Amino acid sequence: MNKLVSVFIIFLFIHTIALSAAVSASELKESPIIVDNGKIISGRTLIPIKVVSTHFGYQVGWEQEAKVVTILGRGTTIRMKIYSNEVSLNDQKLTLEVPAQIYNGVTYVPLKFLSDVFGASIRWNSTFKVAQVLWEDQTMLIYTEIKRIPDVTDKQVDSLSKAANEAAVITDVKYAKEHLKPYFTDKLLGKILWNKGLPFRIQFDSKHQSAVTYPNIYHSQAVMTQLSYFALHTWVTRTMELEYVDHRWKISRIDFKYTYF
């Protein structure tokens, strides 16, 4: 009976972790719209106007002979000629920093177009070369030189978990340094090697694990928590923080905590 109760408590614990993580992620409301074909040319950030306008609920047309793009919606008519700096917004004339231009069949305009014409708020992240566009209740990420960071896969979670288990005790520093390097940031690996392992030698598995969550909108960090039996009515949680480094996910921090049932 006690075993059955313990299993139920573990299930409840993991479910609670996953639920709280989901609530935390919900603070972003809905997942952002991803546009991954922005460009940086001569120091200017250019965005594909058709896909962006369509996501905002506008219709985009093309007048072949005149080489004019029209954007219609919400009582607004926008017209702009390719390779011209001028834009017609209803009866108002606006001037672009650089003219609308075509690359590989796609029409691009400067990023500032979205604030000048649509009234959107724009934030630029220089680390990921991505523009975060806030418009009404929508969030859009327009990537330029760097593509969106991929989510952590189940296979990667399993590999990282096994690497953390191996790092519990270090008996051969040279071997561990070479073998564990793909799974840990340099800073954390150096700390593990110096201490000849982690504070707990307990082994963890993915059976008792929360869902992977992402603390920021760019998905450049991830967190997951695992649970393992320690002693009578006592379990230990291992929380691993991940970072996307050198084009792969690595463990950047590991924390342990006792949990009593």
Image: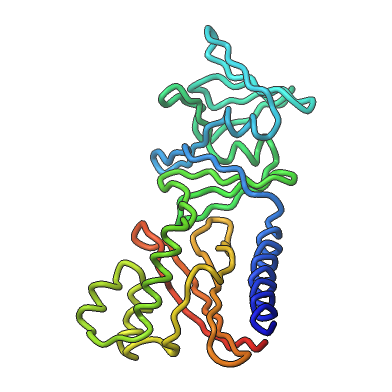
Instruction: Give the residue at x 45% y 24%.
Output: 102
Instruction: Give the residue at x 46% y 54%.
Output: 128
Q: Quadrant of residue 118?
A: top right
Instruction: Give the residue at x 34% y 91%.
Output: 195
Q: Nearer the viewer, residue 252 or 107?
A: 252
53 horizontally vs 128: left or right:
right
User: Which color scheme does this rendered protein use?
Assistant: rainbow
- The relative height of residue 30 versus residue 90 in the rendered view (above or below) is below
Q: Nearer the viewer, residue 54 or 227?
A: 227
Give the farthest residue toward the left: 174
108 horizontally vs 120: left or right:
left
Q: Position of residue 107 (x, y in %)?
A: 50, 26
Q: Position of residue 30 (x, y in %)?
A: 69, 49
Give the farthest residue toward the front: 1
Give the farthest residue toward the right: 75
- The relative height of residue 151 versus residue 114 in the rendered view (above or below) is below
Q: Position of residue 252 (x, y in %)?
A: 43, 73
173 horizontally vs 64: left or right:
left
- The relative height of residue 137 versus residue 197 in the rendered view (above or below) is above
Question: In the rendered image, which quarter contains the C terminus?
Answer: bottom right
- The relative height of residue 109 versus residue 229 in the rendered view (above or below) is above
Q: Position of residue 134 (x, y in %)?
A: 66, 47
Question: In the rendered image, which quarter contains the N terminus?
Answer: bottom right
Q: Quadrant of residue 167?
A: bottom left
| Circle count | 0
Instruction: Give the residue at x 45% y 85%.
Output: 202
Q: Quadrant of residue 208?
A: bottom right
